[in-house]
Amino acid sequence: MIWYLQDLYKFFFHLVQCSYTFTSPRELQVKMTARTSLNLIGLAWSCLSFLSCAHCGLSDNHVHSSFIYRRLRNHERREIQREILSILGLPHRPRPFSPGKQASSAPLFMLDLYNAMAVEEEESLHQGAGKSFSAKAQGHSKKSYYNAQHAGYSRVTPPYRAAPLLGHSPSLRTAHDTNFLNDADMVMSFVNLVEKDKDFSQQRRHFKEFRFDLTQIPDGEAVTAAEFRIYKDRSHARYENITLKVTIYQVIKEYQNKDAETFLLDSKNIQASDGGWLVFDITATSNHWVMNPQQNLGLQLCVETLDGRSINIKAAGIIGRNGPQSKQPFLVAFFKASGVLLRSVRAAGGKKKNQNRNKSNNRQDSSKPTKTGDYNTSEQKQACKKHELYVSFRDLGWQDWIIAPEGYAAFYCDGECSFPLNAHMNATNHAIVQTLVHLMFPDNVPKPCCAPTKLNAISVLYFDDSSNVILKKYRNMVVRSCGCH
């Protein structure tokens, strides 16, 4: 029945085309009748096509498993590495310092962010919220979230897990942190660069200094939030029952023979017996440092009693440079792209080659005679659908700088977009029209192409050259469904 309607459709389509040369009223009437018949036949055709594929599911749930795994050749690996680095916006492969035997606090915190975000986004996806990040889309499930053993880390229970403290938990358990991540494209942690305590005056003898290098931030990224995090254990027994005031200052100007000029940023009153992570908001200061790197002179911290008496920060329980790696102070900043970043010019050349290759393929396809019988044979070919494709960062030799994930399921679209375009092909109106015109003019108009209709993003957690840890979202990296375009 469908093929009969196709032949009838072609007849009336040809009649409508020829009617543009008619001039008499009688010929005009024939033209109108042909157009009406064309519309009715097209409607019947569409209905039959839809009914013929009523058993077909959505392409999201039908993945064709035809991908054959093989080892990459060296030149293939290098080319893929260059392309993926370009997509990730990295000029070269980062080479961080080798991690120690024990994980440091910043990577642990970022790993916790990564896992918490994956859980939240997967739940949102199942609830139909339509958010872009999901653990499922990244090729791993809740059972395979990454732990501190990755990248050579020994198993360390993050001290902030059980922190009974005031302030924010490093995991996504508050609306405050969730809002930061929802608004951010990238999260970056910075380690303290101070290796030797500075000599302060007698008045500031208990002050401690912290410095962070914010010059490695990619172009086009603006700070939306920034926090300084420092860990506090229980204070010395002699301070057990008192309230302490922890204050953080921005260094404005330094002098050679006197203490630096500082600006009060934030302070917190805490019980000496409390322990956990203290979090200070330094968003404005971080923005200032990004815009004016030469004015980044660091932070200073002091601990006082409520009557203004300065006390030793070690006795107060503040963990400094000589403390456990898992409790080291660090800065974390959330960024959002302020503009559209373009890929390198080199990558555009590959696009041109692909376009030329597609044109030659189209010419080859269109050079073949197109008959009604050709579409019978196309039914035996694979229709447009989603196919498996897994990108392994480990196989690319990047396990030393990419913390998570080890790889992701990217998928790809492939298959025929031939008449009739069934419901599961997710064809656009333009693709339907193009298919009909291709029936009439196969030498001039190609078939529609099988391409992604929905794409998801992934998040990647990695080290940069300075061993800072970066959590970045990359959009349009995972094919969710395919269709004819």
Image (tube, rainbow, N blue to C red):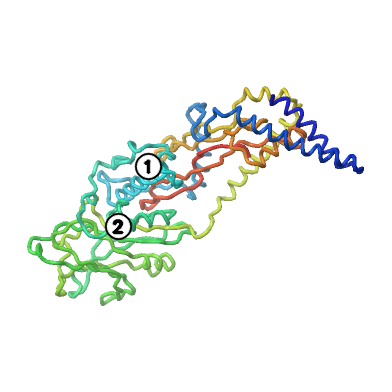
How far apart are the two marked residues, 2 and 1, measured between alpha carbons?
Answer: 21 Å
Few, some or many residues within 10 Å of mark 1 (<14, 14–19, 20+): some
Few, some or many residues within 10 Å of mark 2 (<14, 14–19, 20+): many
Query: Which residue: 61% across, 42% down?
Result: 350
Query: Which residue: 22% across, 71% down?
Result: 200
Left or right position of 44 against 156? right
The tag on residue 330 is 2
Q: Earlier in the sequence, mark 2 or mark 1?
A: 2
Left or right position of 483 against 406? right
Question: Which element type, helix, strand or loop, lies under badge 2?
Answer: strand
In the displayed structure, 313 sits above or below 142; it is below
Q: Pick the quarter of the image with the N terminus.
A: top right
Task: Please state the horizontal and vertical placement of residue 287, each as a whole percent of the image.
Answer: 40, 66
Question: Which element type, helix, strand or loop, lies under badge 1?
Answer: loop
The tag on residue 66 is none
Q: What residue type is labelled 2?
A: Phe
Q: Which of 419 and 277 is in front in this view?
A: 419
Q: Nearer the viewer, residue 141 or 341?
A: 141
According to the image, label 1 marks what residue?
Answer: 400
